Image (spheres, rainbow, N blue to C red):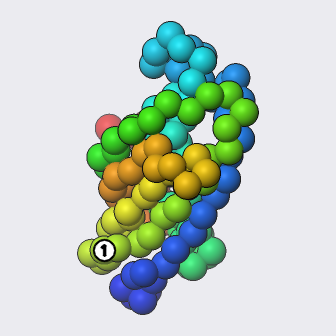
Amino acid sequence: MDYEMLKGLHHSEMLKVEHKDTAAVYGSGSLEVFATPAMIALMEKTCLESVNDKIGEGNTTVGIAVNIKHLKASPVGSMIRCDATLVEVDRKRLVFEVKCFEGETLVGEGIHERFVVDSEKFMGKVGNS
């Protein structure tokens, strides 16, 4: 499949920050604010969902790189919107620009790369040396 045709694809996901999403719970900090690892997980999910039904049956994408800045703390109860745009395609490597907002305020941004894989073949290699 030619994934180049997906370039420019845009997708958004929403998340309400709960206690389980905080730095204190993740262990990435000691405060009750939206954890950077939780933000990155939301970014990855948004990118995954943007292409999941467009890359062919039996395929999925796996994250291979993140370069993210967490710019502002968000308290429990905040609504976070993540926007992902597919900005580069190199065969099966997909590069996304991701941004997270609390209302109109940018709270995180960066680049996330994913790779298209055949789910069955990929899982067949997991754990094998």
Question: Horizontal placement of 4 versus 14: left or right?
Answer: left
Quarter containing the C terminus: top left
Q: Is residue 125 visible?
A: no
Tell me the residue at 63%/74% (across/down).
53
Badge 1: few (under 14), some or many (20 or more) residues near its Cα, within 10 Å?
some
Q: Position of residue 80 (x, y in %)?
A: 62, 47
The front one of 32 and 90 is 32
Q: Position of residue 25 (x, y in %)?
A: 60, 16
Vertical placement of residue 50 versus 45, above or below:
below
Residue that label 1 marks: 88
Tell me the residue at 60%/18% (across/down).
32
Locate residue 4: give its quadrant.
Answer: bottom left
The front one of 4 and 108 is 108
Quarter containing the N terminus: bottom left
Vertical placement of residue 69 versus 7, above or below:
above
Q: Position of residue 97 (x, y in %)?
A: 38, 63
Locate residue 88: give its quadrant.
Answer: bottom left
Q: Is residue 79 visible?
A: yes
Tell me the residue at 45%/19% (across/down).
28
Which element is circle 1 on? strand
> Residue reaching furthest front?
104
Q: Hey, what amino acid is under mark 1?
A: Glu
Tell me the residue at 60%/64% (across/down).
12
Locate residue 104: give its quadrant.
Answer: bottom right
Q: Position of residue 94 (x, y in %)?
A: 36, 68
Vertical placement of residue 22 versus 48, above or below:
above
Vertical placement of residue 80 versus 30, above or below:
below
The front one of 102 and 2 is 102
